[in-house]
Amino acid sequence: MRSQDATISLLGTSALLFEPPGDMDLSAQQRVWALAREAQSWPEVREAVPGMNNLMLSFERAPRRLDELKARLRAAWQAVQPMPLKGRVIELPVVYGGPGGPHMADVVAYTGLRVDEIVELHSAPLYPVFAIGSHPGYCYLGGMDPRIATPRRKVPVISIPGGAVSIGGAQTGVSASDGPSGWNTIGSTTMRFFDPAQDPPALVQPGDSIRFRVEKVIR
């Protein structure tokens, strides 16, 4: 459960982060999308970037009347209604376990579930894309079954490949490129999530949905 009061934090001198109260769910995220659209029209805002149940505002220069801006943000949050975004449904073929899912055993040990049960629970939902961030093309997903929630790793992995399908706490995601990770990788997909030559360069956008299709299970 999050605080019942919105938190507003400065990010250097040219940005701030708005974190609304309440739990992280799709309805709250849809309000974040609505708030981002409204704030983008404010004259002092250069860019409004929705995150995972938060909103970052950047400015050309530090606002002169910061308290007024914070009050306007809080008032706007109270007024906005959830804004559904009708995007695409993208199906990702996933090979679960094996070399591409080196931490499946850790998820099994933590949850007490069998591999087949984890695969079934992970591949069942239609996951809404809440936000894009972390690294280019990476998407934050909502809707994972809490029965397979597994804490992030105490010691991060130095590098996992792009396409790694992982669980971190109550969330699941797919790495868009090679890099370090503290999540538990349970499978892999060959889908390419970021291509700077494309327009837009990211495969998915907020409002899209992802479905994991079981291509193979390696025990």
Image (tube, rainbow, N blue to C red):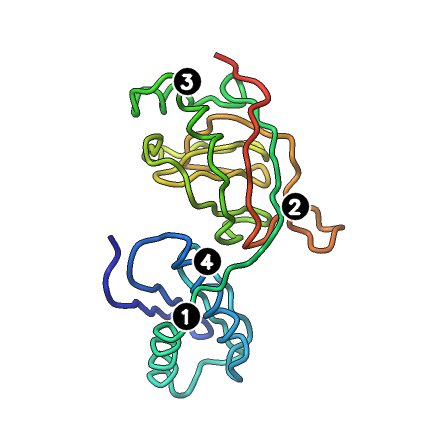
Q: Secondary structure at mark 1?
A: strand
Judging by the rendered image, the residue that carries numbered circle 3 is 115
Of the image marks 3 and 1, the number of the one nearer the N terminus = 1
Judging by the rendered image, the residue that carries numbered circle 1 is 16
Residues at marks 3 and 2, CA–CA distance in whole angstroms = 30 Å
Q: Secondary structure at mark 3?
A: helix
Of the image marks 4 and 1, the number of the one nearer the N terminus = 1
Q: Quadrant of residue 149?
A: top left
Residues at marks 4 and 1, CA–CA distance in whole angstroms = 12 Å
Q: Amino acid at mark 2?
A: Phe
Residues at marks 3 and 1, CA–CA distance in whole angstroms = 42 Å
Of the image marks 3 and 2, the number of the one nearer the N terminus = 3
Residue at 38 percent of width and 67 percent of height:
18
Q: Amino acid at mark 1?
A: Leu
Dot in front, 4 or 3? 3
Residues at marks 4 and 3, CA–CA distance in whole angstroms = 32 Å
Residues at marks 2 and 1, CA–CA distance in whole angstroms = 27 Å
- The numbered dot on residue 194 is 2
Residue at 59 percent of width and 50 percent of height:
136
Residues at marks 4 and 2, CA–CA distance in whole angstroms = 18 Å
In this view, the residue in front, 218 or 212, is: 212
Crowding near pointer 3: few (<14 within 10 Å), some, many (20+)? Answer: some
Judging by the rendered image, the residue that carries numbered circle 4 is 51
Residue 154's place in the image compared with 38, above or below, is above
Residue at 65 percent of width and 35 percent of height:
191
Dot in front, 3 or 2? 3
